[in-house]
Image (cartoon, rainbow, N blue to C red):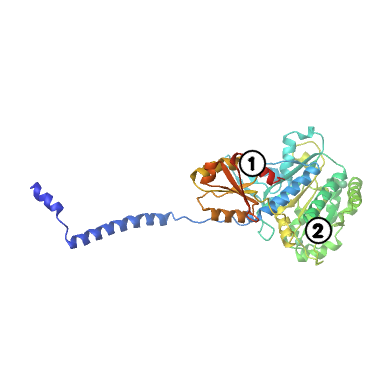
Amino acid sequence: MPKIKLKMKNKKPAKEDIQKMKKEKAAKVQSKVEQPIKEKKIKAPRSFQTLKGMKDILASENKYWEYVKTKAKNFALNYGYESIETPILEETALFNRAVGNETDIVSKEMFSFVDQGEENVCLRPEATASVVRSYVQHGMLNLPQPVKFFYFGPMFRYDRPQAGRLRMFHQIGLEAIGEESPIIDAEIIFFVYNFLKDLGLKTVIEINSIGCPKCREAYKTKLINYYRDRKSGLCEDCQKRLVKNPLRLLDCKEEGCQAYKEDAPQIVDWLCDECKNHFVGVLEYLDESGVIYNLNPRLVRGLDYYTKTVFEFFPDNADGVEKRQDALGGGGRYDGLVEYLGGRPTPACGVALGLERIILKLKENNIEIPALRKPDIFLAQLGEQARKKSFILIEELRKSGFYVVHSCSKKGLKKQLEMANKDGVKYTLILGQKEVIDGTIIVREMEGGAQEIVDFNKTVQEMKKKIILQ
Ligand SMILES: [Zn+2]
Ligand SMILES: [Zn+2]
C-alpha cells in the first residue's frame, strides 16, 4: 500500500490538473492581494495642507528671512536692545487685560482654548503684553532702567487671510521699559526709520499723541458728542465703537465713515500740559534727526494700552499714487501697562514690525538681497574606503570653519563633479582608491579644472591657504 501511495505522489499530474492547480493558486494569490488592498482603502493615506492663513517658509524664501532678521538683530544690538523670547502660549486673561476686551484682536481674533488642565490659554496675538508680563514676573524693575528688549517671533490672529495678512505672522519688536523721556519714543522711531531705509524701503511715518487717561476722558466725551449727532450715518461697527471704544471711530476704514473724520475734534487740542510737552519733545528730537514725519490727528492704534505717542510706518509709494496700504509696523508709548499688569507704575514705549509685509515690499520693489553663504568645498569620493576616510575629513574641515558639502550616495565622479558645480563651490576634493593607498587627496579648482595632489594629512592646512574664511 505505501508503495502505491508513493507512486501516486510521484505520478505526473495531468494537464487539466495543472491548470486547476494554477487556477487555485491564482485565486489564492488574488484573495491575498485583494484583502490588504481593501484594508488599505479604509485607512487610505490622505494628504495634509497648512491651515488657512498659515504658510510654510521654504528654503527658497530663506535668504529674505535671514537677511531681515540678521539686520534687525544687529540694529537692535547697536541701539542697546537685548534679546528676549517669551512663550507663544500665554494665559488668555493677559491679553484680555492688556490689549482690551473691546478691541478686534481680543474680541474676534484670538486663538484661545481651554487646555487639559482647564486653564484658559491662547496663542499670543502680540508680544508687548508678554514682555511686560516677563518684566514684572522677574522683577526687572530692580535692573538699571530702561530695560530694552528686542524680540522676533510668530503671532496669531484669526483674521480674514489676504495678501500680507496671515493668521500666523512674524513680528520684530522693541520694548523699552522704565524710561519716561521723549528721547526713547524718538529713538524707537529713528531705529525703525533707519532699519527700513537700510533694507532699501522708503517709509512715511505717521505720528500722533492720544494723551493720558486724564486728558483723554475729556476728549472722548467731546468725540462721542460729535459722533452721536451723526450716528445714523455710521457703519455698524462704528455704532458699536461709539459706546465701547470711541477712539477707534477715527480709525474706521469704511468708505461712508471717512467724511465724518474731517471735522471730528482732534485730540491734540485736548492734551494736558504733560502730554503736550511730551509730544513736542518727541517731535523736536525727530526734527533734530532729520526724520520726515506726518502729523496724523486720526491715528489712534487699536490697542487699549497706548498712551501719549503713537506712530505707524507706511511704505512710501514711489509712483505717488495715494492708496491706503497696510502699515509695515507701528507702536507707541504704554505708560500704564506695567502697573496694569501688577507692577509698579513704569513708563514704557515700543514698536512691532510685520516681517511678512517687509519681505513682500522687498520683493515688490525688486530689492536685491545678498545670497546666502555658498559652500566652500565639495568632497567627492570613490569606493568604500575613501567614503569612510572622507567622513572624518569632512568633520575636520567643518571644525575649521569650512562649509562642506558632499554626496551621500555612491554616485560616479562625473555626477559628483556636476553636483559640485551646481553648488557653486570653488574647490572639490577628490578621494579615490588610489589616493587612499597613497595617503593623498586631489584638490581640483572648479574654475579651469586645474588639479593638484596634496598630502591627505595636510588637507585642512592646504585648504586654509586657498580659501580665506570670512
Ligand atoms: Zn494727558
Ligand atoms: Zn465706520
Q: Could you say which quadrant of the image residue 135 lies in?
A: top right
Q: Is residue 420 above or below residue 133?
A: below
Q: Is residue 444 something one can see in this rendering?
A: no
Q: Is residue 154 left or right of residue 394?
A: right
Q: Position of residue 186 (x, y in %)?
A: 86, 48
**Disc 1 or 2, which lies upstream in sequence?**
2
Crowding around mark 1 (Cα neighbors within 10 Å: few <14, some 14 to 19, many 20+) is some
The answer to whether mark 1 is within 8 Å of ligand 1 is: no
- Per the rendering, the mark at residue 202 is 2
As drawn, the label of residue 460 is 1
Q: Nearer the viewer, residue 452 or 388?
A: 452
Instruction: Name the amino acid type tagged 1.
Output: Val
Give the quarter of the figure containing the C terminus: top right
* Percent coordinates x, y for residue 289 in the rendering: 89, 50
Residue 450 is tagged as none
In the image, 36: left or right of 147? Answer: left
Q: Residue furthest left?
A: 1
Tag nearer the camera, 1 or 2: 1
Is 412 displayed left or right of 159 in the figure?
left
Amino acid type, residue under disc 2 in the picture:
Lys
Whole-percent x and y of residue 351? 78, 48
Residue at the image point whose x is 54% and y is 53% from the top = 413
